[in-house]
Amino acid sequence: MGEVDYMDDEIRKTISEIQEYYKKRANDGKYATSPDFNLREVEIHYLSQWLNDGKKILDVGCGNGYSTLSHAARFNSCFVGIDFVPEIIQSANELKNQFKLLGSVDFKNGDVTDLRFENESFDIVISERCLLNLPAKDLQWTAIKEISRVLKKGGHYLMLEGSLQGLHKMNDIREKFDLEPIPEAEKSYNWFSNKFDEDEMLSYSKQHFSSLETIQRFGMYFFISRVIHPLLVSPDQPKYDARINEIAKNICLQIPDFENIGHEALYVHKK
Ligand SMILES: C[S@@+](CC[C@H](N)C(=O)[O-])C[C@H]1O[C@@H](n2cnc3c(N)ncnc32)[C@H](O)[C@@H]1O
């Protein structure tokens, strides 16, 4: 993988486990790479605010391509989606048949830490919960550097990734209502989740991008789905497909943030 040559056996092992995890999920339908499907629609909506026609757009860690295809159904641009799990790329190609596309989409195998594209070949690069799957900080830095390399000057990197600060703020609110903290990663589901310390990530990003255009948060979705929802159904567990999560999505599409909370955010970097 990329420029990280010291990679130890433990990290290699984790990477193979992550690949195995996504391989198993490859045929789990359109939301295979995100069980919180309402949140994913929120992500797609706010990512799309930064897209337009006539662009070359790379989606790294595209998973089964649902988001990439949703964008290409709306924008007449050339999309390339890459993922390091061949089975998931295969399911992305199958899903493509279900979409009526305005733009073109090319899915291929690829590794975000070692992008096989020329310098400055894209107007926009998207990562939607991809870098949080990289199990070492050096790999995350290499990915950011690679993304900057393939981005044209003046282009945007739409970085929708995990935030430790947002998670902690959400847990502070949960604590006020006697809700257990949500862990940084959960054993059964996203044990490899490697969220960013925002201060550290933004300071690193300054070396590769000229400015940070905005940080878009989705606090409203998280407040309703991770605070109100569990209080409403307690002692039962909240479910992703509950009606209140759909309401949370609809409110968040109009009023995105609440108190900067949430374990993910969209950081818009300009090269
Ligand atoms: C949480 S899923 C998100 C997928 C998609 N972006 C979405 O929004 O649903 C993370 C994806 O990143 C991919 N991935 C993880 N590490 C990668 C790497 N080094 N290079 C390319 N893809 C990677 C995984 O295979 C998985 O499909």
Image (tube, rainbow, N blue to C red):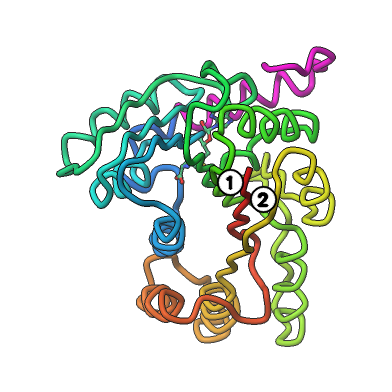
Query: What range of the chain is rendered magenta?
Result: 1-23
Instruction: State the residue lying farthest toward the top.
Output: 5
Instruction: State the residue lying farthest toward the front.
Output: 153
Which residue has dot 2 on it?
186
How would you classify the magenta stretch by its main secondary structure?
A: helix
Q: Please give the label number shown on residue 189.
A: 1
Q: Position of residue 207 (x, y in %)?
A: 79, 40
Residue 29 visible here: no
Q: Position of residue 266 (x, y in %)?
A: 58, 58
Residue 143 appears left or right of 169 = left
Residue at x-position 27% and y-position 28%: 93
Residue at x-position 77% and y-position 67%: 168
- Whether residue 21 is in magenta: the answer is yes
Q: Are marks 1 and 2 in contact (CB under 8 Å)?
A: yes
Q: Please give the label number shown on residue 199.
A: none
Compared with 180, 34 (above or below) is above
Residue type marked 1: Tyr
> What quarter of the picture does the N terminus occupy?
top right
Residue 27 appears left or right of 257 = left
Residue 111 visible here: yes
Image quadrant where residue 213 sits: bottom right
Compared with 66, 217 (above or below) is below
Q: Position of residue 79 (x, y in %)?
A: 35, 35
Image quadrant where residue 263 sits: bottom right
- Whether residue 57 is in magenta: the answer is no
Compared with 36, 1 (above or below) is above
Gap in angstroms between the C-alphas marked 1 and 2: 6 Å
Residue at x-position 51% and y-position 76%: 256
Q: Give the SS element for disc 2.
A: loop
